[in-house]
Amino acid sequence: MARLEQPALAAKARATEFKAGFDLENILLSWSSGKDSAWALHLLSKLPDVRVTALFTTFNSAADRVAMHAVRRSLVQEQAAAAGLPLWPIELPWPCTNLDYENLLTPIFQRAIEEGITAVAFGDLFLEDIRAYRERQLAGTGLKALFPLWQLPTPALAADMIAAGVRAKITCLDPTKLDRSFAGRDFDSSFLNDIPGTVDPCGENGEFHTFVYESPVFRRPIRVKTGDVVERDKFIFADVYSVAHTPVSTTV
């Protein structure tokens, strides 16, 4: 029981920290489809007087999948429905330059301000350069940058997610850091026990990415299966699809 209580304690501590420094109300959350986004939503839901208004996700328009995670758009739509939140898609061309990406974010931030949103939250854990980049993106917009998971110890964080009921599939991994046999596996205690000690338990150094199919913030789980595992662009991808909507092809 003590382990199951830990996520609630972490959420309470983080709520105290944020309320001491921010007067937040409506939040736009960056949603990658993975466990860190889901846990950020879980922690934000514990904060008093704070409401996550919408999720935004970047899609590779050519593939109709989440950029990098390679998760099907339909699955992200199911996640948003399960969370009871609107999904704001950002359509990225392929290939996509950094300038393209930044230009496409501008109207999303403008929309957020028009709809009374005061901050944008991200699920980043400890990479200082990524946090600085996010903060530069929002500089001058009037929106605050919020990092609910910032510097939480990743071994404990991963264990807390699993203990609280986060269920996810490994959809993408870097084969120079993690063997391809891990693609398609569940993010669970067995996974954490099996990964090499050089791999961050939350994959924050790009070792792996996930798709969440069950979470404390979901009204219902998403029933999924794993399809083909392929290598592309020096990464290994495992396709995941909804049991309710089996596609003609399960190739990523």
Image (cartoon, grey):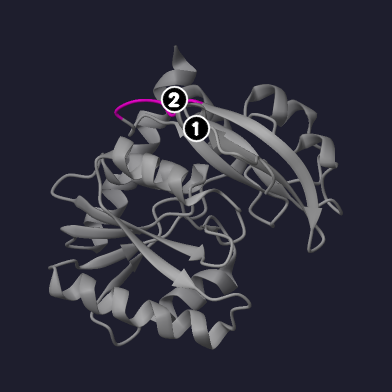
- Pointers 2 and 1 in contact (C-beta within 8 Å): yes
Q: Identify the residue position indicated by label 2 in the image.
A: 164
Residue at the image position 56 percent from the left and 38 percent from the top:
247
Q: Which residue is nearer to you in this view: 177 or 175?
A: 175
Q: Identify the residue position indicated by label 1 in the image.
A: 161
The magenta stretch is 219-223
Name the spot of residue 140 as percent of width and height, x first.
Answer: 29, 87
Residue count near mark 1 (Cα–Cα under 10 Å), binned few <14, some 14–19, many ≥20: many
Mark count: 2
Residue count near mark 2 (Cα–Cα under 10 Å), binned few <14, some 14–19, many ≥20: some
Residue type of the residue flagged with mark 2: Ala
Please check the rendered image and state whether residue 56 is part of the magenta-colored stretch, yes or no: no
**Residue 138 seen by the camera:** no
Residue at the image position 14 percent from the left and 68 percent from the top:
115
Name the spot of residue 39 as percent of width and height, x first.
Answer: 43, 41
Please check the rendered image and state whether residue 221 is part of the magenta-colored stretch, yes or no: yes
Main secondary structure type of the part rendered in magenta:
loop
